[in-house]
Amino acid sequence: MHRRPIGVRPHNDCYIFTHQWLRSDNRPHGLPQTLSVEDRRREGLHAQLCGRDAIPSYIDGPSIAFDGDRPERPNYKEVVLVDRLKAAVERINKGITDVEVEKAVKKALRAESPNLITNNQAFHKLLVDGVDVDYRRDDGNTTAKKVWLIDFEHPEKNEFLVVNQFTVEEDKHNRRPDVVIFVNGLPLAVIELKNPADPDATIQSAFKQFETYKVQIPSFFNYNQILVISDGNEARAGTINSDWSRFQPWKTIDGKEKASDVEPQVEILLKGMFEKKVLIDLIRNFIVYEREEDPKTKSVTVTK
């Protein structure tokens, strides 16, 4: 039994990308005579994300859209690359049946609340604790089987993918986050970039952009674990419920020593946080949800 998601290339997409330039309309072509600041910024970001120990594959968003040359989405409302997720679940969980794969994926992607944080917390629990799927044993009895969406013990066995200009539609809103980091087809991290040449385009405006996205395309963030804002030099990371003060720079590349203040924050963050083992460890062990109860109304607020 073997599945191969549509659009998976057998070679290193990042090698191709770093030897081509991506135009502002997202189509690769040969080296241009002139290159805009926006093009340089995007090319540099992907080159850093696709380092040897970081995320190895890159695809431009329009190419995997339903009307692209390598479609992986039935429409712009679908934000999970389902074929990649099913292939990963099959690969990680040895001996799993097709029916069990379908049940696990369906359960993991089901959103049961109108509240974004509630959905996000429910998904995070399934992500780190595994998905319980009922199956019938040889003796005829039914029991629960644990199905994993991510291989936490062997981070390198997961599929990491960088996608730029990923269009999302919801409730008549059409938005296009700059860079989405998929792990096994799940959009777990998003990076919003602002042009450093534009004095009005700051990392705070990138933060405000995320605030708008969460209102207009909330379903996209049901699966999100990490948000990153950057202007190409300064960079900070937070979660979907972090206010401005809680978005903070990443301080180290190797996890042992504080990086030099001379090195751009965005390079430190991309090389440090998006090293595969670090990213998987962050998702599993360093994302916490807090519950606060109002003593007067007895209402409960969940924060991440």
Image (cartoon, rainbow, N blue to C red):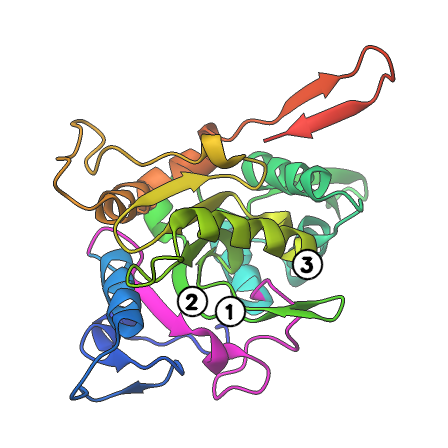
The answer to whether 146 appears left or right of 267 in the picture is right
Residue 268, x across and y down, in percent: 23, 43
Residue 24 has which mark?
none
Which amino acid type is shown beneath numbered disc 2? Val
Q: Which residue is drawn at 30% across and 36% down?
A: 250
Q: Mark 3 points at which residue?
A: 216
Identify the element where label 1 is drawn.
Answer: loop
Q: Which residue is drawn at 63% across and 58% down?
A: 97
Residue 65, x across and y down, in percent: 55, 79
- Give me the C-alpha separation between circle 3 and circle 2: 20 Å
Magenta-highlighted residues: 52-81
Q: Mark 1 points at which residue?
A: 166
- Give me the C-alpha separation between circle 1 and circle 2: 7 Å
Q: Residue at x 48, y 88 (%)?
A: 69
Residue 26, x across and y down, in percent: 39, 80
Near mark 3 (Cα within 10 A), the count class, few <14, some 14-19 or many ≥20, is: some
- Give me the C-alpha separation between circle 3 and circle 1: 15 Å
Q: Name the residue under label 2.
A: 163
**Residue 8 belongs to magenta span:** no
Report which quarter residue 52 is drawn in: bottom left
Q: Is residue 219 above or below residue 275?
A: below
Which amino acid type is shown beneath numbered disc 3? Gln
Q: Are marks 3 and 1 in contact (CB under 8 Å)?
A: no
The answer to whether 292 appears left or right of 93 in the picture is right
> Disc 3 or 1, which lies upstream in sequence?
1
Q: Residue at x 21, y 72 (%)?
A: 18
Query: Which is in the foreground here, disc 3 or disc 2?
Result: 3
> Disc 3 or 2, which lies upstream in sequence?
2
